[in-house]
């Protein structure tokens, strides 16, 4: 498991809240969220079966609300969340792993 006490980077998270008449709707940006960002290059399958190239994996605290389709800004670049996994340990929720386009 990753050490949540030492997440070296900061990201901005905008959770997908639904669809509106002009496209996806997002929550207000939650900035300065602690994170660990790793560069990866994987081909993953989304929940709809679409194959997508993933360029980053981000580890977040378990208190962050994020779903597939949300937006995360890393180093000034806004990217869409492709997959989300909530990981637990013996004490309960430990962290959230997201993969970004």
Image: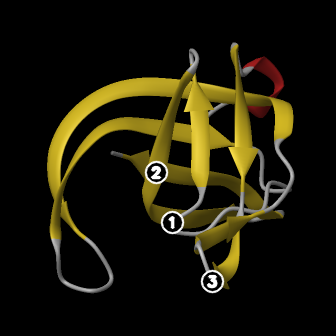
Q: Which residue is drawn at 59% across and 73% down?
A: 22
Counting other residues with Cα less than 10 Å from the Cα at mark 3, is it few (<14), some (14-19), or many (20 or more)? few
How far separated are the C-alphas under marks 2 and 1?
6 Å
At mark 1, the secondary structure is loop
Q: Which of marks 3 and 1 is nearer the N terminus?
A: 3
Q: Which residue is drawn at 76% across and 18% down?
A: 6
Task: Please tell me whether residue 47 is drawn above or below residue 59 in the rendered image.
Answer: below
Task: Please tell me whether residue 47 is drawn above or below residue 73 in the rendered image.
Answer: below
Residue 56: image location, x then y, percent = 37, 34
In front of the other: 44 or 16: 16
Task: Please tell me whether residue 23 is drawn above or below residue 42 in the rendered image.
Answer: below
Residue matched to label 1: 69
How far separated are the C-alphas under marks 2 and 3?
20 Å
At mark 2, the secondary structure is strand
Q: Looking at the image, can residue 66 be seen? A: yes
Quarter of the figure with residue 38: top left
Which disc number belongs to residue 80? Answer: 2
In front of the other: 76 or 9: 76
Counting other residues with Cα less than 10 Å from the Cα at mark 1, is it few (<14), some (14-19), or many (20 or more)? many
In front of the other: 22 or 16: 22
Q: Looking at the image, can residue 1 be seen? A: no
The answer to whether residue 50 is left or right of residue 20 is left
Residue 42: image location, x then y, percent = 16, 45
Residue 45: image location, x then y, percent = 20, 70
Quarter of the figure with residue 96: bottom right
Counting other residues with Cα less than 10 Å from the Cα at mark 2, is it few (<14), some (14-19), or many (20 or more)? some
Q: Which of marks 2 and 1 is nearer the N terminus?
A: 1
User: Which is in the foreground here, disc 2 or disc 3?
Assistant: 3
Query: For the view shown, which residue lies furthest in the front direction?
Result: 22
Residue matched to label 3: 21
The answer to whether residue 94 is left or right of residue 41 is right
Q: Which of marks 2 and 3 is nearer the N terminus?
A: 3
């Amino acid at each position: 498991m990753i050490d949540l006490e030492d997440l070296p980077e900061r990201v901005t998270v905008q959770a997908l809240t639904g669809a509106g008449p002009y496209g996806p709707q997002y929550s207000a940006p939650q900035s300065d969220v602690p994170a660990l960002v790793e560069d990866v290059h994987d081909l993953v399958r989304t929940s709809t079966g679409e194959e997508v190239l993933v360029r980053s994996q981000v580890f977040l605290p378990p208190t962050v609300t994020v779903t597939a389709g949300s937006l995360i800004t890393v180093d000034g670049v806004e990217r869409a969340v492709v997959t989300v996994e909530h990981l637990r340990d013996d004490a309960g929720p430990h962290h959230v792993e997201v993969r970004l386009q």
